[in-house]
Amino acid sequence: MKKLVFGTFILLSTHLFSQNISLQDCESQFLKNNLYLLANHFNIDAAQAQVLQAKTWDNPNIGIEFNAWTPNGEKKYFNIGSAGEKSAYIQQLIHIGGQRKNQINIAKSNAKLAELDFSILMQDLKQQLRNSFFTIYFDNQSISQIDKQLASLKTLIDNYSIQEKKGNVSLKDLIRLQNIYLGLKTNRSDLMNEIIDNKKTLEVLISDGKNQEVVPTPTKEELDLYKKPISNNVDDLQKMALQNRPDLQKAVKTIEANTWNLKLQKSLAIPDVTFGATYDQSGGAFSNQSNLTIGIPLPLWNTNKGNIKTAKAQVSQAEVQKKTQEVEVSSQVKSAYLKYLEQKSNYELVNSSIPTDLEIVFNGVYANFLKRNISMLEFTDFLESYNSSVLSLNQISKSYINSCEEINHSTASKLF
């Protein structure tokens, strides 16, 4: 009775703390809960704040001057009355040559770069999420098939163990069954390790802090999306990638930002102007004298040549990097497309009659073995072949969908 209650508790606990989740729900939780995205989004906020900062004028300078000691006449401290001396000034720095405009445009470019970094991160994490999702799903399918085989084999092994002790069957036949059983246990262990690693990745990506185990369960509609072949050729896909990829957009925006920086450095070679006004009670040529001031530094030693040269080099570097990235992206798309074609031809086997035929033949072979119509050697050879085929079919499905996701990622498009 205690065992029954304990077993029931375990089943209920597993049910309560696990959650079947579709791909759509998984992605919804990812967009809502992912901490990487939430943290990275602050970079956008910070970059946009710098746009506001770049638009802000420099603060004016204000100062006063007053007499500390009168050396003759009354000889007193702080003589700032009507017969004393005090003065004041106010100054405002004015950037000319388009400096302020260039700084604003650099800040706007940097804000766009932050947004593109966010898009790149989201694109990479979404591919990681989908790969982990479907890897877990198909590995679970393989585990389910293995568990059925293990249960059947366990029954056979238990019966053969009893009969071997009675001398009705040979030890060699028992060992054949045990070897297959151990091989399946090894396969199961390898698959479970992969599932555990991918679950860790998936739960980190969609975690909401509840520590709830998720069980990837794509809907039929979500699986059917991958059955539809793409009509685009590799040239179309490469054009799509060159237009949509956020990393390429970032390369273009980097050139723009560096070009604005070059303009800024050239404008910084133009001296700033300082306008101001002063008041002097009795220290000037007249009493209560008011003056206007203008100041400009003389560009004798520093004409910002070094920074201008550096900015030019950065523009040239960004242009070369963009061309290099375009070549890399085109190569990635081509590679992803070739992988897709290869996996697609394999995936057609999954949608053929092979899986059904395998199941029918297995049931027939198993039934005939129990009736002693086939030998142990024939049965174990078939079991090894059958289990290998079942695992291969799930591996083919997993590899095919991952190749589809690589097409999606390399073109930054939703083709599946």
Image: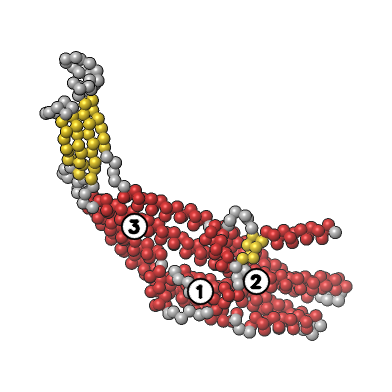
Q: Amino acid at mark 3?
A: Ser
Q: Amino acid at mark 1?
A: Phe
Q: Amino acid at mark 2?
A: Gln
Q: Nearer the viewer, mark 2 or mark 1?
A: 1
Q: Residues within 10 Å of mark 3 (few under 14, many from 20)?
A: many
**Could one spot residue 301 in this view of the protein?**
no
Measured from the top left, where is residue 197 in percent x and y? 59, 61
Measured from the top left, where is residue 130 in percent x and y? 54, 67
Quickly name the residue at label 2: 141
**Could one spot residue 85 in this view of the protein?**
yes
Q: Using the image as rendered, state which of residue 283 and residue 162 is in the foreground.
A: 283
User: Going from the N terminus, do you reach mark 2 or mark 1 first?
Assistant: 2
| Residue at 31% in and 50% down | 55
Quickly name the residue at label 3: 109
Kindly identify which numbered label has been placed on residue 416: 1
Q: Using the image as rendered, state which of residue 110 and residue 59 is in the foreground.
A: 59
Left or right, residue 207 beside residue 148: left
Q: Nearer the viewer, mark 3 or mark 2?
A: 3
Q: Using the image as rendered, state which of residue 107 and residue 393 is in the foreground.
A: 107
